Image (cartoon, rainbow, N blue to C red):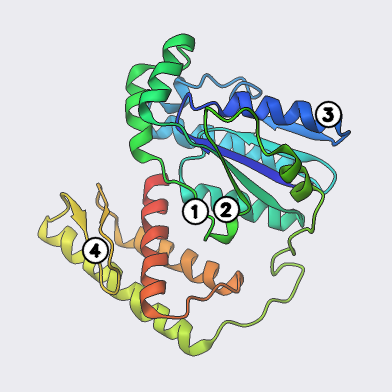
Amino acid sequence: MPLVVLCGYPSSGKTSRSKELCTFLAEKGISHNLINNESLGIDRNESYKDSQAEKMSRSALKAAIERTLTKTVTVIADDLNYIKGYRYELFCIARAVGTTMCTIHCDATTDEIVRFNAGTRAYNESILAELPQRFERPNDRNRWERPLFVVRPEDDRLPLEDIVTMIEGKSLNPNLATVSQPVADKNMLHEIDVVTAQILAALQNSQTEGVMAGRMKFPYCSKAVTINRVVPMGEQRRIKRQFMKVVTDDGQTPSTSEKAAEMFVDFLVAQIAQD
């Protein structure tokens, strides 16, 4: 059964919504499993104290999801899940199992989470202030983030019937390991290869010249992004290989150089944030 991924700011109500969903699924007789820091015995403040702790926490949560998710058990992933690239990895897990995934965004403002946290003291003030700045909002234009359900604190309940309809609906196809996918257009793949090479060349030039402060713009891409650390050449090549595999395996080859650039820049920023 599907993977339900919750995401949102700290203290935005994710665990409360997860429990609300669990109660409804139990009433419907749907087998489910809730996975979060609490279920794994991980202290939420310790898990976000530094980048290494974050990596370990994400790895533990991902491993638990991989162990638990099957075609007969719905898994609810209750965590910040604030990195777009990580949510894509969870989508890949669901796809490999041959099931679906949906995203629930608990959309609270920074003022609201400060007020909510004052009553629970669930997060340290430093974590509460820092993590929202790194949150990458889900977008229903991304195949791996839809169906996307957005819930606000003032909403009385989740769209539970719609979520259950999704849970009982059509499954995703497994990846190339079991199903032959259509081959992406070779001309466009060549164009993507050229575009990504130019973007990485621009990144490398900025690093060589020591111009890494502020927001950066890249060839073919209209939006500016922040990259706050040096990315070694080996890591750049690895990220490019992963991206080329994504656009080839998913059958989501962008149709223009501009779309390819935007997709790659988003992917690049997400991967850098994880490492």
Calculate the distance from the C-alpha at mark 4 to the C-alpha at mark 3.
Answer: 50 Å
Query: Which mark is first along the chain, 1 or 4?
Result: 1
User: Can you identify the residue that label 1 sits on?
Assistant: 139
- Mark 3 neighbour density, 10 Å: few (under 14) some (14–19) many (20 or more): few
User: In which quadrant of the rendered view does residue 164 lie?
Assistant: top right
Calculate the distance from the C-alpha at mark 4 to the C-alpha at mark 1.
Answer: 26 Å
Disc number for residue 203: 4
**Closest to the observer, 270 or 125:** 125
Marks 1 and 2: CB-CB under 8 Å? yes
Amino acid at the residue labelled 3: Ala
In percent of the image, x 54 and y 56: which residue is there?
A: 140
Disc number for residue 145: 2
Amino acid at the residue labelled 4: Leu
User: Can you identify the residue that label 3 sits on?
Assistant: 26
Marks 4 and 1: CB-CB under 8 Å? no
**Closest to the observer, 41 or 165:** 165
Marks 1 and 3: CB-CB under 8 Å? no
Query: Which mark is first along the chain, 3 or 1?
Result: 3
Q: Secondary structure at mark 4?
A: helix
- What is the count of numbered marks? 4
With respect to residue 126, does 82 lie above or below? Answer: below
In percent of the image, x 46 and y 10: which residue is there?
A: 119
